[in-house]
Image: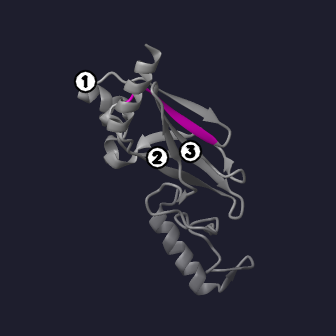
Amino acid sequence: MFTLVSQLVCLSIISALEPTLAGFSSSQIELPWQQYFPPTKSHWKLPKSGRPERFRLGKGRFRVTHKGADIDCEFPPSTLILSNINWERADLGANGNLDIMYKTLGESREFAVIGRPKGSTLHFFGHSPLDRGLYRCMATALDPIAGRTVTVFQDVPFFPNFRWNARLCGHLKAQIA
């Protein structure tokens, strides 16, 4: 059995003596460590961060009632949404998970996410000043022109006037009583 070194010596001797070996030149003979298949060329570059590109599509809105608050995001009808729409607190950075934030602060918060085909609503059952901030809804969508997945998002600034809402709720309670 020949070792790799002896194979190389034999190939170099044969290529020196015989310019072609069985119809192949020495440059066409592939050694064991060479790549047998040509490298594939990608037609589009991956983002440097490893995640799909992000595109802002529109701006959401919020509505405050005496029972709670709704934060809405609705993507354009032409958007091809591929995943569920997720919510995060964009102004908190990596700590944007609402469950963890409320548990850390010792607050009991109830909220629900209501999904629609092209949008979503984050509903707070009751609200407090802790809820004030910048909320972001995100989804994975298909870019029909490039044929690749992208992340689409909307930012919703949620900064209600709690003093005005307290007067409104007090006025409503006085009318009910």
Stretch in magenta? 119-127
Image height check: is 19 above or below 94? below
Q: Which mark is residue 106?
A: 1
Asked which secondary structure carries label 3, the reply is: strand
Rendered location of residue 99, percent (x, y) = 37, 29
Rendered location of residue 64, percent (x, y) = 46, 35
Q: Amino acid at mark 2?
A: Arg
Rendered location of residue 164, percent (x, y) = 36, 37
* Quarter of the image with the C terminus in it: top left
Q: Amino acid at mark 3?
A: Cys
Asked which secondary structure carries label 1, the reply is: loop
Nearer-N-terminus badge (2/1)? 1
Q: Residue tagged by mark 2?
A: 136
Image-based side of 145 in relation to 63, left or right: right
Foreground mark, 3 or 2, reads 3
Q: Nearer the viewer, residue 81 or 162?
A: 162
Image-based side of 94 in relation to 158, left or right: left
Q: Is residue 83 visible?
A: no
Asked whether disc 3 touches disc 2, contact meaning CB atoms under 8 Å apart, the reply is: no
Nearer-N-terminus badge (1/3)? 3
Image height check: is 134 above or below 46? above
Image-based side of 16 in relation to 78, left or right: left
Q: Nearer the viewer, residue 20 or 96?
A: 96
